Amino acid sequence: MDQRIAGFSRPDPVTIMVRGRPFVAHPGESLAAALIAAGLWRFGEGEDPARPRAPVCMMGVCQQCLLRVDGRLVQACLTPVVAGQVVTPA
């Protein structure tokens, strides 16, 4: 069943580099949503390896989705996808 909203279209997908691998994402969607859609839930390591960092709130409060994008530390849930981004763990 198609869950898309009628009459709404997404921009053409772009490629971003995540941990040295290319991934396809849609410009404007949050980086966290794009990574989750690609099956990447583990965003980093916490003090306890059994409890990795991952997006929790998806609205910028918890800061568990911190990543480096083009060398800058950002919250993935608040950062839009842009073609050519280079994403690495924080």
Image (spheres, rainbow, N blue to C red):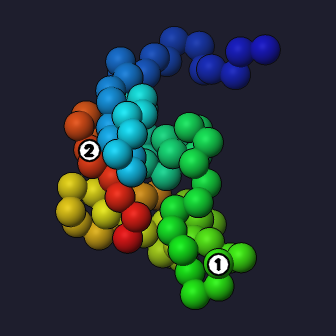
Residue 30 horizontal side relative to residue 14, left or right: right
Residue, far right: 1
Residue at point 39%, 39% (across, down): 21
- Frontmost residue, 85 versus 6: 85
How far apart are the two marked residues, 2 and 1, measured between alpha carbons? Answer: 27 Å
Residue at point 56%, 37% (across, down): 38
Residue 57 shows in the view: no
- Frontmost residue, 76 versus 68: 68
Residue underneath mark 2: 85
Q: Earlier in the sequence, mark 2 or mark 1?
A: 1
How many discs appear?
Answer: 2
| Callout 2 secondary element | loop
- The answer to whether 75 is drawn above or below residue 49 in the figure is above
Q: Residue 21's mark?
A: none
> Which image quadrant: the N terminus?
top right
- Frontmost residue, 51 versus 81: 51
| Callout 1 secondary element | loop
Residue, far bottom: 47
Q: Residue 49's mark?
A: 1
x and y, in percent, of residue 74 in the image: 33, 66
Residue 7 shows in the view: yes
Residue 53 horizontal side relative to residue 83, left or right: right
x and y, in percent, of residue 78 in the image: 40, 58
Residue at point 28%, 57% (across, down): 69
x and y, in percent, of residue 11 in the image: 36, 21
Contact between labelled residues 1 and 2, with CB atoms less than 8 Å apart: no
Residue type at numbered disc 1: Pro
- Frontmost residue, 38 versus 48: 48
Residue at point 45%, 17% (across, down): 9
Residue type at numbered disc 2: Gln
